[in-house]
Amino acid sequence: MPRPAAAVTGGCAAVLVSALLVACSTGEDATSTGPLFPSGSAASSASPAPATESTAIPESSEATPGDAADAAAAVDTALATLDTLEVKGRAPKTGYDRAQFGQTWADVDRNGCDTRNDILARDLTDVVFKEGSCRVLSGVLDDPYTGQRISFVRGEDTSADVQIDHVVALSDAWQKGAQQLTPERREELANDPANLLAVDGSANLQKSDGDAATWLPANTSFRCTYVSRQIEVKAAYGLWVTQAEKDAMVRVLGDCGDAPE
């Protein structure tokens, strides 16, 4: 079987979420404190490593003083990065088309696997590949957006149960600076593992092209990571935020990484 997909690295965002894998001390929606994705979506041993390795910070009620200090430092970093982003209104959506961001799920790293299969292999556990290929046939997703566990089975009626979300939606990116990027840079954005998550299909459809001001994951324990990822992706690609979006991000980050009582 060919080598499973490796994470795309060329031109990818340097996401500073390592200590922001925080349960945002909101309680009932908290999920497990696994690696990269707090919902436990690290890939199986047959799958590629996540784009960013990190250790999750427990909920504030269970955190050690060292954990709380790391989380607070990560919050400060995210807020500082947010302050570097230009704040202005959305540009018109005129001219937006998915094709402006290149082929859908291209094999940008030339590893023989398209980006969708790369991300499925990274984010699912118990992954089963089609014999002789890196095509993901089934696996288990601990969905970061809802906190629910989803059994993925590829098929005409089931593949859409797990979708690959652009953390910074491409339409949102188009209206906040991506129009000025080169076609090659837009394709990098569309296929950057730092901007991609395997998620519940219905949650992805609900999000649509929303930004942090209009949509946040129902799983509140993932919001710190989600917002920090959006900030780092926007910084990496020179995109801006609206004032309402920035205000929402500041509110979310303000609830992250509180020290234990």
Image (cartoon, rainbow, N blue to C red):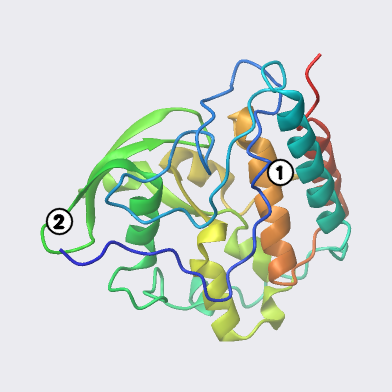
232 or 17, which lies in front?
17
Q: Say which mark, if any, is on residue 130.
A: 2
Residue ranking furthest to the left? 131
The residue shown at (73%, 55%) is 231
Q: Position of residue 140 (x, y in %)?
A: 31, 37
Q: Where is residue 100 in the image (x, y as percent from the top left)?
A: 54, 78
Q: Can residue 205 be seen in this view?
A: yes
Which mark's residue is nearer the viewer, 2 or 1?
2
Q: Distance between the residues labelled 2 and 1?
A: 38 Å
State whether residue 54 is above or below residue 94: above
Q: Where is residue 227 in the image (x, y as percent from the top left)?
A: 70, 46
Image side of residue 87 versus residue 50, left or right: right
99 or 26, which lies in front?
26
Can you tell which quarter of the image residue 235 is in? Answer: bottom right
The residue shown at (84%, 63%) is 85
Q: Name the residue under label 1.
A: 214
What's under tag 1, amino acid-wise? Answer: Thr
153 or 210, which lies in front?
153
State whether residue 131 is above or below residue 191: above
Say what secondary structure mark 2 lies in.
loop
Image side of residue 162 versus residue 89, left or right: left
Say what secondary structure mark 1 lies in.
loop
What's under tag 2, amino acid-wise? Answer: Lys
The residue shown at (71%, 43%) is 214
The residue shown at (63%, 38%) is 21
